[in-house]
Amino acid sequence: MMIVVAACSQYSSRPGAITFHNVSARYNAYFMAEQDMLEAEYEMQKAYKENYNSLLPILLPMDSILAQPVKPKLLDAIKKASIVAEKHQNSKWIDNSYILLGKSRLYLGQWADGLEALRYVYANGRDENDKNNALILLMRAYIEHKDYSNAVGVAEHLSQQPLSKSSQRDFYLTKAYLHQQNGEYLTSVAILEETFPLLKKSTETARIHFAAAQMYDRLGQYALANRHYKSVNRNKPNYDLGFYSNMNSLQNAVVLNPERDITNVGFDKMLRDRKNDDLKDRVYFTMGLLAEHKKQIPEAVSYLQKAAAASKGNMQQKAYTYLQLARIEYESRENFEMSKAYYDSALAILPQEAPEYRLVSDRKRALDNFVTQYTIVSAEDSLQRLAKMNPAALDNKIDAIIEAKEKKRLEEEEKARKAQIAAQNASLQQGGGNPLATGGERRWELYDPALVNKGKIDFKRAWGNRPLEDDWRRSSRPLRSLAGNNAAGGTDSTAVAQTTQENTGLKKGTAEWDQVHALLKKDVPLSDTAFAASQKKKEDALYNLGKIYRFDLKESNRAIAAFERVLSEYPKTQYKDEIYYLLFLSNEENAAQKESWKSKLLSEYPTSTYARLVNKSTDAGGTSGNATKEYEAMYKLYADGNYTKALEDIEKNLPSYKGSSMEDKFALLRVFLIGKVRGKDAYGQAITEFMRLYPTSIYLPRLKEMQDFNSVSMGKR
């Protein structure tokens, strides 16, 4: 017995002992650990909710929250894999067990332990293929931690190694995932093109084709994107994946052929399909994007409103719809109050973990303040125009305003009354009736429309058509309001007659009319003191608007217009020196104007704080004088449209300013020039390269925000 036990020791190098431990490890502990891992991954894959509004990741993320429901299986996998390490040291499956153990740790969020297990395999592994598999998983872990530099280092090492077919497939997918997460879509799709021949037909392959198509979309290669969207349907997609693939393919067909009509390209068939009832919101959303792309703004708004109305439980999609409507109202229609309302609605339902949440929250706060200041400017503009009229014209204008509002109120009340009567008649025809009239049991008053209507009529007879507001019984309020609530119609002919009498409206020449007229006229700044106060309010609001444009909304051109309007309308404004400085900062792309505002600031306010700030920014960096001149020369070439010459000069001179304060400024101009000379793909790569090389640049937040908001604006296809 002792001889047999010694012969089967895990430390023995005898062929019999090795065979025993290989079989025991493979078909006991390792087999059960592997099954636990497969079941856990299957459950996590089922639970993962794809967000088709954003770019699908090539590999599913290693999310510890997603792993919580399968934590017992992962812990059991760790336990079983550890048995191999403890009891089968001479087995060839020990490397595989450590890889499985490390993978389980990574899924559970135990990054340090997981990385240690994978590094152990690379350092002490016996099989080269296992060592390569450990490195592939290690590279994926680095990507999940956004440690792209280490991930690139591992990828470079693996590219030099001979890989098996399965390892080559996993390596290509992981490397494509690395470049996708780093924003290098062109490189990512190039790797995927080499990977597809290694993949079998499956739902996962269909998903990778979809991710490739999305990246081609972002690169503007719509024909290549459609090729992969068609490949999705040839690889056993689930229903949602097939639906979004077909819809994005139709979208690209319209983009590639602008003459095609949105209504008959195929969306109507998708809307009629009963299987798509819960996806109609996404179809309407896509139609809205296409209508906006074709500059059909009213149609775009209509489709997006239909999308919001059709949303059935998909709050995330509804949030994106509101964001799109908010952007259109702001950019295309300049309806700022409506834009603010849509941002409010989006923020109320957008999950806080969504990548757009912070950006939308910041923009919503900016718009809250913006709408306040914009309303002040608009109101004071109107009041000042009224104040400049002669008294007779002013009275006629106020009377016209009252008449228009009163007419609109009466029309709205009449429309509401007819709609209620029609609804009540339909209810009676269906056998409803009034239980009070038929001797039925008395209901609570608020459940009975007849009693509610009678109460409204009695209230209106006593108090007039009042809006819903505080202090409505004050004697200083007019007896009738121009913005009153709609009166409800009665349920019989007597009630209808009473309502009609009550809705006759204000009559010119009556005391009520004169009271409303006086209230409106009271706000007009007729005295010199009141007009000066109105001017001050407008000046402050315009100045605040310019700062909101400049710092919160990142819109330099509108900021410049607002500041110049302050200087034009208020030459003696108290904000003059600060506005000069803000105009100096805002004219980033116009060197001549920038220099002009700097000269004005230094000549008119040489001792101000803002003059010192300008001098400091100009003198920083030691070689800033020469650098500024060379930058201005290159910028002039850019402004004159001589892009190729400007790019050649800047790439030749950029190394000489390495480490200077203006290096990132030269690099930013280079990004713009690459976009002009080398096209979209190179432009996207240049942006990514700038963000990687200049992580502390003052221009980085602006570039990131433009990039993030552009993805929201494109509808997160």
Image (cartoon, grey):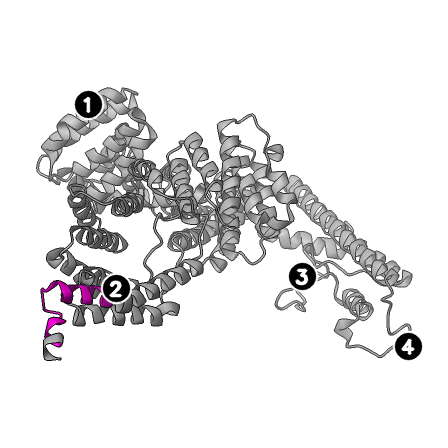
Select label 3 or label 2 by which is in front: 2
Q: Nearer the viewer, residue 191 or 474?
A: 191
Marks 4 and 1, Cα distance to the nearest angstrom? 93 Å
The earlier-in-sequence mark between 2 and 1 is 2
Label the magenta part by its dominant secondary structure. Answer: helix
Q: Which residue is mark 2?
A: 26
Q: Position of residue 557 (x, y in %)?
A: 38, 36
Find the magenta span and give its range: 5-25
Of the two numbered discs 3 and 1 on the same chain, state the one appearing first in sequence.
3
Which residue in the structure is indicated by mark 4? 439
Q: Is residue 158 left or right of residue 210?
A: left
Separation of residues labelled 4 and 3 (CA atoms): 35 Å
Q: Quadrant of residue 142?
A: bottom left
Task: Look at the numbered disc 3 and give the secondary structure of its residue.
Answer: loop
Measured in 3D between alpha carbons, the distance from the residue under mark 2 to the one under mark 1, in whole angstroms, is: 62 Å
Measured as percent of width and height from the top left, residue 279 is found at 57, 50
**Disc assigned to residue 580:** none
Considering only vertical position in the picture, is 375 above or below 218? below
The residue type indicated by label 2 comes to Arg
Q: Pointer 1: what residue?
A: 648
